[in-house]
Amino acid sequence: MVEPENKNLQMVHEHYFPTSICYTDVPDSVALNRDLTDKIHSWKAEDPEGIVRSNVKQAGSWHSQLDMHEQPQFHRLTEVVRSAATDVFARMHYDTDFAPVIDNMWANINPRHGYNRSHSHPDTLWSGVYYVQAPQGSGRISFCDPRLQAQVFTPRFNADSHTDPASWPEVYFEPIAGRLILFPGWLVHEVEPNLSTLDGDAGNRISVSFNIFQSSKRS
């Protein structure tokens, strides 16, 4: 019997079809968040009904109108979002003749038990969330593997080893005040119920969400 010359072949591993989720912690966000909290609560007082999208109104979740980026009192956050999107566009090597433009932006207030159903953001390039107030236990955002066929049959992994994040069927991000997350608009996501034990408004999870597309600088 002839033994093979190479008993343990070393394979080259290359990764394709990646899904990028980008985040940063905005510097000096404490004062920004304090200001945003007051203004978003005032906005809700003026429009207590808001609108319904992925937010579950029966659980008390409030969703503002979609023109937050057009209101002067939110200009500072709007510029933070544009700056973050500009960085993502550069890292993705997008055509430099096109700049990121905010299509719409809105505020979310989720009290205890408030949450957002599984959804995606159609007709947009990138979407994102910025956390204004996020007490402990106020609910993580989760993203699902968009490759449906990858879920047809899943492998078993060693229980005592660290698995490659590329093999995870879903990933969770803790809400952290001052954190900004960007992700592809088509990526399915949802937000867990707010289980904060703090009383009153201090227990609310307050966030701002937005959609971004490309616009020609020549127009």
Image: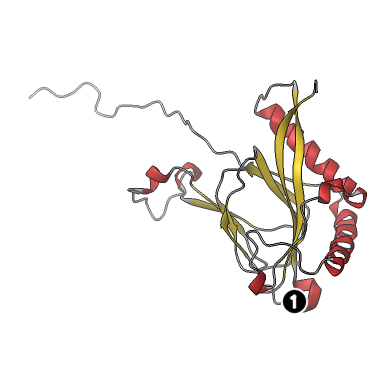
Q: Is residue 166 above or below residue 99?
A: below
The residue shown at (59%, 38%) is 20
* Image position of 119 (left or right of 196): left
The residue singled out by tag 1 in the image is: 198
* Image position of 190 (left or right of 161): right
What secondary structure is found at the residue carrying circle 1? loop
Color theme of the render: secondary structure
- Residue 28 picture location, percent across and down: 87, 50
In this view, the residue in front, 24 or 205, is: 205
Name the quadrant of the C terminus: top right
- Residue 39 picture location, percent across and down: 89, 61
Q: Residues within 10 Å of mark 1 (few under 14, many from 20)?
A: some
In this view, the residue in front, 59 or 131, is: 59
Q: Furthest residue to the left?
A: 1
Q: Judge whether residue 113 can be spotted in this image.
A: no
Name the quadrant of the N terminus: top left
- Residue 145 picture location, percent across and down: 48, 47
* Image position of 35 (left or right of 206): right
